[in-house]
Image (cartoon, grey):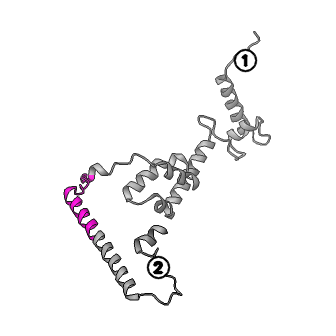
Amino acid sequence: MEQIDKDLGLENLPPEDDSEVDWKAEATKFHGIATRNLTKLQRAQKEFDEYKTQNPLKPEPVKPESARTEEKQGFDHGELAYLIANGVNERHHERLFKLAKEMGTELKDLLSRNWVKNEIKELDEKATTQGATPEGGKPAASKDEGSVEYWLAREEYPENNPELARKVHKARGEQEKKQNKFTKQPIV
């Protein structure tokens, strides 16, 4: 604060209640201070202009467009976090990346579209049903009481249909022939 007062010449101001102030002399004094400050400013401006001409700013070299933009190989960590937060399974990430790249849209816009949500939901349901179905297992027995598979699964014979009972007996015999004749847990 004292430096500002000194620069403006306010440190030697007369007290306000002094009625014998030579206002013309004070005005002349402040006019001289303002002129001196203007001269300092002009000198600094001139020095700055000389410096700029001697040391011009070097513009950054412009890189070709292909060098500036790198091809993304996948989602970054922020986008992966967004996918996880929205409940998108990891097996769909590659498909969504390809879609976003083909369409030229951002991930947020892509996930806001209903057809994308429905496709993800269908793929999840398909994967769930495939995971629930045993591979290489026997097909489920039919619920039709007139079929051989039904009676084989129940391990009984039909009482009121002798022809079906013969078919069941024959099928059971074929199953036993296919089974291993040795025990699964040897005694030794």
Residue at image point 45% right, 72% down: 5
In front: mark 1 or mark 2?
2
- Look at label 1 and name its amino acid: Thr
Q: Which is nearer the eye, 143 or 73?
A: 73
Label 1 or label 2, whichever comes before in sequence order: 2
Residue at image point 37% right, 59% down: 104
Q: Which is nearer the eye, 50 or 78?
A: 50
Q: Which is nearer the eye, 147 or 120?
A: 120
On whether residue 52 falls in the magenta region, the answer is yes
Boundaries of the magenta span: 42-65
> Which quadrant would residue 99 be assigned to in this image?
bottom left
Q: Which is nearer the eye, 34 or 131?
A: 34
Residues at circles 1 and 2 in contact by the CB criterion of under 8 Å = no
Residue at image point 24% right, 62% down: 47
Please tell me how crowded label 1 is: few (under 14), some (14-19), or many (20+) other residues with Cα within 10 Å.
few
Q: CA distance from mark 1 to mark 2?
A: 118 Å
Q: Which residue is mark 2?
A: 13
Q: Which residue is mark 1?
A: 183
Q: Residue furthest right?
A: 159
On whether residue 175 falls in the magenta region, the answer is no
With respect to residue 151, does 32 lie above or below? below
For numbered disc 1, what is the local secondary structure?
loop
